[in-house]
Every structure is written in structure tokens, then in C-alpha cells.
């Protein structure tokens, strides 16, 4: 096939770029990029594909360095200058293909069917970052076309949590706002002979789809306008009829095998009430909404990859603009699944208390533990736009958070399962403790009369005559141990600080309060709920802790960073 030089170079450029971004270029991506920049090629797709396939094979087989070399020849700015520019303005994500400053529109399309989690934060942050970087627009669109799943509460929580993440959409809308428009496009598709009403039984549809056989409704679909009118006018009931896309029933990609575009769901909708029962599927609504909303770059998680072809075919059939579609990997942590399919039953069965249970990866749970929105943003951006499905370690997020909260967390003492130490030679003392080891954050006074508590883990190992240091207080020598009563008798020795002896935290019996730390562990081990996933650590903390306000971050020495929940409880964040 003949191309002019410019087009030839453009194709080569797209393939090279795609194969560098994702190791191997893929025909779907290359084709969509090509067509969105040269829409008049659409009519020529059949003739171009074999040529593209040949070029893709050729370029995929090159070494990475050779690809970069070729790209640099075509675009002198490739690599160097862009990277430099990105570092300069603190933007670290890879450039978007065909992005024009001032004209990029991205969107985050959550379904209001649960509380947002760390994966949603990733999607929303990346979308917003791109829009800001290119001086474009960022849309928050509630993809609310399945009233079986959606609830008013979830719209509110999504707004709240995005606000917490300091994400500010330029436009907020609901897909359900456009229900009339979506019906209109559904009808247009049927009129174009790209869709049809199917009245087969759900089991039949399922069976024929898996065996790749077209049903009667499709075969006799040319005159289905009458059926269409009936469908959209509410003649049918649930499961009696659906609208299907005329795809390819033999395609290896089963997403193309005449998927459902509209179904009847006779359930109250949080926004439209009972006004509508004919609901588009995500497969139909998403491309149309993206296209009509002016979205230039639609980013979605990798599991949608097989649906990209359908996304484009629907828009092509309706003669609507096709946005760039890009993928990134799903984010979740080991033992902390994000899937609502896994989380909802735990709540229903009361295995966890609520959506903000600290074991969950929801944003509310992270907030409750004292993770900061800044740490989440830094963490997400540090991952970049990878496609690899490996789960990052939660320790990476923790270390971003630690850097932030370490600056403000007051250091405090807490002892687990306390043993009492009587200080035989003590006189009343006021001990001045620093609130932070390096920053000037004030001091607090601890009154010690003649006894303190230490943790059982430390006490158990002590033997008569051994010496320990009570941090910031004094060295003591053990005189007597009563393991049954959990009591020790000790003597304060001369204050030699730097001896090589155990240094342990303590609280004064005069100045302490019963306290608990709620500590989450892995929610799932392999695929099973971990019944020991929530540890409640009880003990005594310095009474100063009860004066701190909810949300204050503290570091309990040798336990870790925690967020104050109320005056006798805090929630563990991380070490
Ligand atoms: P689930 O129901 O498992 O929580 P979902 O994909 O159905 O996930 P949506 O509310 O439909 O959730 O997703 C909204 C957007 O967030 C989509 O663009 C989706 O790709 C993205 N997203 C959802 N989960 C993740 C994740 N774990 N990592 C990254 N992005 C995600
Ligand atoms: Mg979804």
C-alpha cells in the first residue's frame, strides 16, 4: 500500500513509540492512535491493517536501543528534552501521545457502588495530574448506570475522599444525567444496523455467546425498528429483551461477541428514582460519555484492554470522535484486596466493622490510620504509569508517609500488658521529656513517685541483678521479681547513660491511663479471611495522650506511628 512520506513517518513514529512504552506495539493501539490523528483513514482500515501488522512485527523485533535511536532521528526532542522539562516542573509521568497544551481532557469515572480505595486514588491522581500538566480539564463522572449497585451515600463519600486527596475536578457530572441522550444513541445504533433487540432467554444468550453462534434476533434484525420502539417505550419487562451490539460472534475476543448495550433494571436509582428502567451498560455508556464530554485521553486499568476494540467500534458505528485510550496497572497491596466483591461480604457478615476499618485499603481507612493525602499522591506518582501487575509493597507508601508525619508526631511512651516496678530508693521526681528528638516541639513533665510500669515483653526477660535503662529517666537494677503478680522491685542506680544495657520505655503509675492501640494486619492470607487481622493492644500510656485532639499523630516509642482516635484509643499507622 502506498503512503506519502509524512504518513509513512507518522505510522513508524506511532509504532516505535508504542513499542517503547509497552515493550511491544499492538495493532489495536497503533490503529486507534493513527485514526484519531488521521480520521479520514477510517474508511481504509481494511487495507492499512496488513501493512501495519508488517511494520509492527519489524519494529517489535528491534532492540530497545535501536528503537530509541530511530525515534530520536524522527523527533530530536524524544527522551532528553521532555525528561528535562518534566523534571523542571516536577512532573514525572510519561508524556501523553497526541497531547496538545490547553486541550487535554481527562476523566475519573467511578461507579458509586462502594467506598473509594487506593486504586481509585491512583486513577484519579494520574488523571488529574495529566490535566493540570497540559493545562487541560479534569472531569469527575459518576458512572451510575446500574441502580442495583449504586447508593446515594457512595456519591457523597467519593466526593469527600477526592476532596481529602486535594483533587479538584473542573466538571462533576453523572452518566445518568445523559440517560435520554444515551437512549437516543442506542436507537441510532439500531437504525444503523449496528445494534439489535434480542429477546432470547439469558441462558440462550450465554450459550450462544460461548459457542460463537448468532441468534435468531440478530439474523432477522434488519427490520427490528418496531421492536426497538417497543423496547424504548417500556413494553418489555426485565430479562425479556436487551439491546445488543452487532459485533462479531466468532471473534476470539469475546468482548466483541454481541455484548449487551442496554438492559432493563426495574430498581430505584439514587438520582433518577423510578423514572428510567432502561439502563446502558458500562460498555456502551463509557465510550459515548468520553467522546461527548470531549475527553481526549481516557485512562483505564489494564483489565479493560480487551474491551478497547468494542469501545472504538461503538464510537465508529455512531460516527463519534474516538479518544486516545491508555491503560495502566491496577493497584492493590498484598493481603488487602480492593475488590468490592471481596469487601462487601465481609461487612455484611460482620467480619469487619465498616468501610473505614483500618484493615481495608479504602481511603477512609488510610485516613483513619493517619496516612496523609500528600503521601498517597507521592506514592502513586512514584509508581508511574506501569503496566506490570506486580503488587507494590505497602512499605513504600508507609515510607512516604513516615517522612511527612515524622516532622510532627509527638514521641510518647506506651507499655503493653504492664508490669509494675517499685523503685525502692526513689524520691518524688519531675522528669522533663522532649516531645520530639530533633525538633523544638516543647516538653512535658512526668511526675514519678515510687513506681513505674514497663511492658511485659521487656519485663519477662529480666533476671535478678540485671540492669536496664528507663529511657530519658534513669538506670535501674532489678532486686526482686514476682512473675505471678507481674511485679518487680528495683533500685535506681547512678545515672550512667551510655552503658550497653537494654533501653526500654516506661510510664509513671501516677501519670498514666489505660490505653489501647488498634493494629491492623493482613486482611487476607492467600484467599482466606485472616481472623487474626485486627489486633487490639492494651496497656498504659502517658496521661498526656488523653489531652491530644483526635487526628493528632503520635509515635509510641518502639510501637510505631499512630493516629489519635479518642482519649483512650489510637489507630496504628505503621512502624
Ligand atoms: P472495584 O469494583 O473492584 O472496586 P472498579 O474498576 O469496578 O473496581 P470503578 O469505580 O468502576 O471501580 O473504577 C473507577 C476508575 O478507577 C476506573 O477508571 C478504574 O479503571 C479505576 N480503578 C478501579 N480500581 C482500580 C485499581 N485497583 N487500581 C487502579 N485504578 C483502579
Ligand atoms: Mg466498575
Image (cartoon, rainbow, N blue to C red):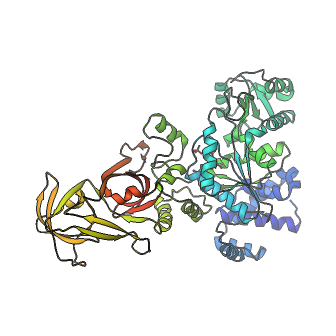
Q: Nearer the viewer, residue 158 or 331?
A: 158
* Image-based side of 37 in relation to 403, left or right: right
Q: Nearer the viewer, residue 308 or 233?
A: 233
Indicate the quadrant where residue 241 lies. top right
- Total count of labels: 0
On screen, residue 85 above or below 446? below
User: Could you tell me residue 3's position as x and y percent?
Assistant: 87, 63
Residue at screen point 13% across, 64% down: 463
**Quarter of the rendering occupied by the N terminus:** bottom right
Residue at screen point 38% across, 58% down: 545
Q: Is residue 472 visible?
A: yes
* Image-based side of 153 in relation to 56, left or right: left
Indicate the quadrant where residue 185 lies. top right
Indicate the quadrant where residue 167 lies. bottom right
Residue at screen point 42% across, 75% down: 438
* Image-based side of 48 in relation to 543, left or right: right
Extreme-front residue of the structure? 428
Amino acid at each position: 500500500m502506498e503512503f506519502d512520506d509524512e504518513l509513512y513517518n507518522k505510522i513508524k513514529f506511532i509504532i516505535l513509540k508504542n513499542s517503547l512504552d509497552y515493550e511491544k506495539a499492538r495493532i489495536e493501539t497503533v490503529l486507534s492512535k493513527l485514526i484519531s490523528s488521521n480520521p479520514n483513514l477510517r474508511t481504509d482500515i481494511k487495507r492499512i491493517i496488513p501493512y501495519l501488522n508488517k511494520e509492527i512485527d519489524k519494529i517489535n523485533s528491534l532492540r530497545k536501543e535501536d528503537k530509541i535511536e530511530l525515534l530520536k532521528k524522527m523527533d530530536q526532542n524524544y527522551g532528553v528534552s521532555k525528561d528535562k522539562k518534566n523534571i523542571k516542573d516536577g512532573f514525572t509521568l510519561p508524556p501523553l501521545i497526541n497531547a496538545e497544551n490547553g486541550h487535554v481532557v481527562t476523566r475519573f469515572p467511578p461507579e458509586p457502588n462502594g467506598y473509594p480505595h487506593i486504586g481509585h486514588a491512583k486513577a484519579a491522581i494520574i488523571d488529574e495530574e495529566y490535566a493540570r500538566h497540559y493545562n487541560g480539564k479534569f472531569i469527575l463522572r459518576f458512572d451510575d448506570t446500574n441502580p442495583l449497585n449504586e447508593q446515594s451515600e457512595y456519591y457523597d463519600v467519593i466526593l469527600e475522599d477526592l476532596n481529602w486527596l486535594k483533587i479538584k475536578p473542573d466538571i462533576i457530572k453523572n452518566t445518568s444525567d445523559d440517560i435520554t441522550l444515551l437512549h437516543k444513541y442506542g436507537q441510532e445504533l439500531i437504525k444503523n444496523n449496528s445494534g439489535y433487540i434480542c429477546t432470547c432467554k439469558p441462558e440462550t444468550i450465554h450459550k450462544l455467546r460461548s459457542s460463537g453462534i448468532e441468534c435468531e434476533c440478530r439474523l432477522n434484525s434488519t427490520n427490528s425498528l418496531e421492536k426497538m420502539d417497543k423496547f424504548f417505550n417500556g413494553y418489555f419487562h426485565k430479562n425479556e429483551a436487551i439491546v445488543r451490539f452487532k459485533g462479531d460472534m466468532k471473534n476470539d475476543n469475546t468482548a466483541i461477541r454481541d455484548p449487551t448495550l442496554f438492559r432493563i433494571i426495574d430498581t430505584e436509582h439514587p438520582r433518577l428514582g423510578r423514572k428510567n428502567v432502561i439502563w446502558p451498560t458500562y460498555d456502551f455508556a463509557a465510550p459515548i460519555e468520553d467522546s461527548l464530554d470531549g475527553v481526549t485521553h481516557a485512562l483505564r486499568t489494564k483489565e479493560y484492554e480487551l474491551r478497547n476494540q468494542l469501545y472504538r467500534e461503538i464510537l465508529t458505528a455512531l460516527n463519534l470522535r474516538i479518544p486516545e485510550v491508555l491503560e495502566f496497572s491496577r493497584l492493590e497491596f498484598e493481603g488487602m484486596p480492593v475488590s468490592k466483591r471481596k469487601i462487601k461480604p465481609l461487612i455484611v457478615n460482620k467480619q469487619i466493622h465498616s468501610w473505614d476499618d483500618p484493615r481495608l485499603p479504602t481511603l477512609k481507612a488510610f485516613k483513619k490510620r493517619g496516612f496523609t493525602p500528600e503521601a498517597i499522591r507521592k506514592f502513586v506518582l512514584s509508581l508511574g504509569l506501569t503496566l506490570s501487575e506486580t503488587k507494590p509493597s505497602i512499605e513504600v507508601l508507609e515510607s512516604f508517609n513516615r517522612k511527612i508525619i515524622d516532622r510532627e508526631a509527638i514521641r510518647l511512651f506506651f507499655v503493653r500488658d504492664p508490669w509494675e516496678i517499685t523503685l525502692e530508693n526513689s524520691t518524688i521526681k519531675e522528669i522533663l521529656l522532649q516531645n520530639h528528638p530533633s525538633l523544638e516541639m516543647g516538653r512535658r513533665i512526668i511526675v514519678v513517685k515510687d513506681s513505674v510500669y514497663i511492658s511485659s515483653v521487656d519485663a519477662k526477660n529480666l533476671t535478678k541483678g540485671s540492669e536496664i535503662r528507663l529511657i530519658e529517666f534513669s538506670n535501674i537494677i532489678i532486686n526482686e521479681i514476682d512473675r505471678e503478680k507481674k511485679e518487680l522491685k528495683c533500685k535506681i542506680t547512678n545515672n550512667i547513660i551510655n552503658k550497653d544495657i537494654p533501653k526500654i520505655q516506661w510510664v509513671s503509675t501516677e501519670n498514666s491511663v489505660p490505653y489501647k492501640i488498634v493494629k491492623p494486619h493482613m486482611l487476607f492470607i492467600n484467599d482466606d479471611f485472616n481472623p487474626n487481622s485486627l489486633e487490639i493492644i492494651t496497656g498504659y500510656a502517658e496521661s498526656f495522650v488523653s489531652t491530644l485532639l483526635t487526628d493528632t499523630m503520635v509515635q509510641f516509642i518502639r510501637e510505631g506511628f499512630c493516629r489519635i482516635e479518642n482519649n483512650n484509643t489510637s489507630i496504628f499507622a505503621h512502624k
